[in-house]
Structures are given as structure tokens and as C-alpha cells.
Image (spheres, helix red, strand yellow):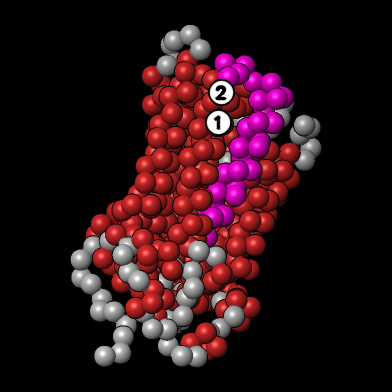
Amino acid sequence: MENSEPLRPIEGKFAAIVVCWLLGNGCLFSWNSMLTIEDYYIYLFPKYHPSRVLTLVYQPFAVGTLAILAYKGDRINTRIRNLFGYTLFFISTLAVLLLDLASSGQGGLGTFVGICIVSGAFGVADAHTQGGMVGELSYMLPEFIQSFLAGAAASGALTSALRLITKAAFKNSKNGLHKGAILFFSISTFFELLCVLLYAFVFPKLPIVKYYRSKVAFEGSNAVSSDLAEAGIQTSSIRVKEGKQLERKGTKQLLLENIDYALDLFLIYALTLSIFPGFLSEDTGSHSLGSWYALVLIAMYNVCDLIGRYIPLLESLKMESRKMLTIVIVGRLLFVPAFYFTAKYGTQGWMIMLTSLLGLTNGYLTVCVLTSAPKGYMGPEQNALGNVLVLFLLAGIFAGVTLDWLWLIGKGW
């Protein structure tokens, strides 16, 4: 009897959604830890603009690495790529902890350079995991992508909550800021190790994941061989349809057919990162919340970003019209004058509300675009398109953190 496409399993969906949420969390947990602890870094490195410099260092590595990975496409082993990314996150987060312990929280140029190197490593890790996971989940269920993206947003909310707790816990103790940072990075390091173990030993064993990986191999993908072997499925038992490789659309054609989605993601993150976190950390003035003000703004952004990523679960509130998505995303450019005038004339309450709206729209629109785009394609094409879309997302972040420096014009460095 000829081998045919495997039957779809009914078990493992909920477990896969939970694991995707945790893996999405781990994809940005380390980086959000570095962003969330900006109050500590601004205290250690007041002359180096850490909230802007670290982000600017991070992005070229993320965009450059993902561009190479997207170009290589189907030739790269998905499992090795994602495992490398999560492992690098763990090692880099551990390095931040060890660097802080070695310097005893004294700051200095050498320590700052070390942190910048780690920031670049985070960018390389992000390119491997975020692009790899979105590409992989694109040929599975939309719920998996939504859960992964919600987990990524939750990392911001969780790190903000964790930072507020650690800051408060050591508020009245000697070197409290440093002790809070040590505890903060220790927890972050442990969580990244957990993500390595989840992706290596739990995710590939789930029946629904085995099914989709078998299906995409059946459709002609070369990137899942070790994933299937890890799950106990022999690739030789999966017959690839003749001519399937020839029928598949190339990356360039996929991009041209979805250029509006790609540009949408670019604009979403170029706008968001031109404001968050640099402007919110350094340019919103002094208010009654004092040193807590920047932390509260970042926390509100992260919480609302998380909420926004769950709104599309309600079908009646999910925006799927390509035209409307573009109109709304372009309309977000009005946030720039809104933040400028609020920082200059508004109270902290107005700034908190505006920051919340920024996060809410960022999360909502991200999920709407990424769950709507990879439809109507074979698994390998969905994987490739997912990588391309994440590349434009990271390019938008890079543009945003570059534009963020424009807020410093006329203020002196």
C-alpha cells in the first residue's frame, strides 16, 4: 500500500497551545528583562543612554541574522535552529548575571561594553527563535501563532511585574537596586533554561505537532527531518509528492503577494519602537512617581500589549480586511505628535493612558496580521512566508530604535 498523508490527530492541541505560550514568552523574556531593568542601567550608566544604545546594538544582529536565515529557507534544519536560539538566550542571560556579579554593580565603560555584546547575542538568538517559531507555527494552527505571540507579549508584562516586585523587595536595603537586579536576572536565566528543555523534549512529542511536521514533510519541506526523527517518525516513511518542490512558490513571489502584510508589520514596529522604550524612559519629564514613573509606563505598555494579543480570539473583533489593517496601521502615526505634546504639556495620567493605547494597538494589530497572512499556501510556503514577515517586523524595530534618537534633537547628549 502506498504511503499517504498522515491522519490528523485530535489530542495534544491544548498542551501545544500552552507550550507555544511558554516558548513565545522565552523568545523575548531575556530581552524584555534588559529593557525592563532600564532604571538600573540608567543609574549605572547615566552618560551612555543605555535604553537607546542597547536596543540599537540588538537590532542589526537580529535583522542581519534573520535575513540570512530567511534566504537559506528550507535548507536550514528547524529543530537545530530553534534549539540554538533558545540555548543562546539562556547562555546570554547567564552572562548578564555573571557580568553584574563580577562588577559588583559598579558600572563603568568595560561593563557597559560587555552588556552591549550580550545585547548583540540576544539579537542573534531572537532571529533564530522568533523567525523559526513563527515560520514553523505558520503551517500549524492559527491558535498556535496567537498563543506564541501572546506569550511574547506576556514576557513583557511578566518582566515588568517581576521588576516592580524585586525593586520594592529591596527598596530599603543597602545596595537594594543591585540586589533586586541580581534576583531579577537569576529568575530570567532559570526561565530560559526551562524553554530549552520544553522545545527539546516536550514540544516534538505532542501528537498534533507530529502530525503537522509529517504533513509539511509530505508537501516537500526539507527543514523538518530531525524534528520528525526526534518524534520517532522516519522520514523515509513519508512519500513526498512528485513535482511538489517545483510547484512551490519562491520567497520573492511570496513577498510580492503579501507585500502589504510585510509593510504593515514594518510600520507597526517602526512606530512603536520610536517611542518605546527610549522616549518613555528618558524623555517624559519628572513626575510625582519619581524613579517608578518609567517602570509604570513600561509595565502599562506591556500589559496592554498582552491584552491586545488576546482580543482577536473573539472573531467579531478580529480585523481581517487587508485594506482596513493598512489604514489603521498608517493611522497609528498620529501617536508621534500625541506623545510629543503629552510629554510637553500633559500630566502623568494622560501619558499612562497614551502608553496603554500604544501597547494595546501594537499587540492587537500584530496578531491580526500574522494570523491572517499565511493562508492558502502549502506548509513549506507558509514557513517561508512566516520568516519573511518576521524579517520585516524586525526591520521595523530597527528603524524604530534608530528614529528614537530624533527625540534627542535640541536636548544635547
What is the crowding at mark 1: few (fewer than 14 residues within 10 Å), some, or many (at least 20)? many
Amino acid of disc 1: Val
Residue 142's label in the rendered image is none
Residues 340 and 23: in front is: 23
Identify the residue shown where x is 44% and y is 34%: 189
Query: Which of 172 and 374 lies nearest the eye of the viewer?
Result: 374
The amino acid type, in three-letter code, at marker 2 is Asp
Relative horizontal placement of residue 39, taking residue 382 as reference (left or right): right
**Where are the magenta residues, as a range?**
102-131
In percent of the image, x 36 and y 79: which residue is there? 238
Which secondary structure lies at badge 1? Answer: helix
At 52% from the left edge and 60% from the top edge, which residue is drawn? 131
The residue wearing badge 1 is 96
Left or right: 141 in relation to 160: left
Q: In the picture, which quadrant includes the N terminus?
A: bottom left
State whether residue 206 appears in this view. yes
The secondary element bearing badge 2 is classed as helix
Are circles 1 and 2 on residues that touch, CB within 8 Å?
yes
Q: How many marks?
A: 2
Q: CA distance from mark 1 to mark 2?
A: 6 Å
Q: Is residue 247 magenta?
A: no
Instruction: Indicate the position of residue 55 as horizontal and vertical percent values.
Output: 63, 43
Return the mark for residue 100.
Answer: 2
Visible residue check, residue 360: no
Q: Residue at x 58, y 19 (%)?
A: 102
